[in-house]
Image (cartoon, grey):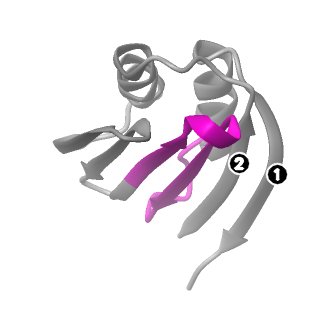
Amino acid sequence: MRHVMCKLTNGIKDNWIVEQAILASAHENNLDVRKVLREEFTDPTGITMLLLLGESHYSLHSFYEQDMYMVDLFTCNPNTPVKKIIRRLAELTSSKITDIVEMERS
């Protein structure tokens, strides 16, 4: 089991683009997305996304007022390319990975 938590900074502040980016990073890397939960906020603006996966979960919380997204990806599949998924999310949101922690869980 692998667990990655990271902070992305200076990214796009558009809920629709962020939503499409997390979905694309999941689908491009063959994550088994079973359900998508989404909550949009207006004051302050932002979005929280939760992708329930066959292998666990992938989530993003935006903090536009602080120029960051907090991302959490947990998978039971040891072959999931977790860092590649995070790098793709950063690319699609034009953000920078400023903090990343990867842990093996057992």
Q: Was residue 63 drawn as part of the magenta stretch in this picture?
A: yes
Q: Is residue 104 left or right of residue 64?
A: right
Is label 1 in a helix, a strand or a loop? strand
Furthest-right residue in this view:
98
Q: Which residues are magenta?
A: 58-81
Q: Is residue 29 above or below residue 52?
A: above
Kind of residue at disc 1 = Asp
Q: Is residue 100 left or right of residue 76?
A: right
Quarter in which the C terminus is drawn: bottom right
Mark 2, residues whose alpha carbon is within 10 Å: few (<14), some, or many (≥20)?
many
Q: Which mark is residue 66?
A: none
- Residue, x 41% and y 31% (percent of image)? 26
Kind of residue at disc 2 = Lys
Residue 51 at what x, y percent from top left?
29, 46
Q: Is residue 28 left or right of residue 89?
A: left
Residue corresponding to mark 1: 99
Residue 18 at what x, y percent from top left?
45, 23
Residue 35 at what x, y percent from top left?
15, 44
**Do the residues bearing badges 1 and 2 touch, measured as CB atoms within 8 Å?**
yes
Which of the two discs, 1 and 2, labels the residue nearer the N terminus? 2
Q: Which mark is residue 7?
A: 2
Q: Was residue 69 drawn as part of the magenta stretch in this picture?
A: yes
Is label 2 in a helix, a strand or a loop? strand
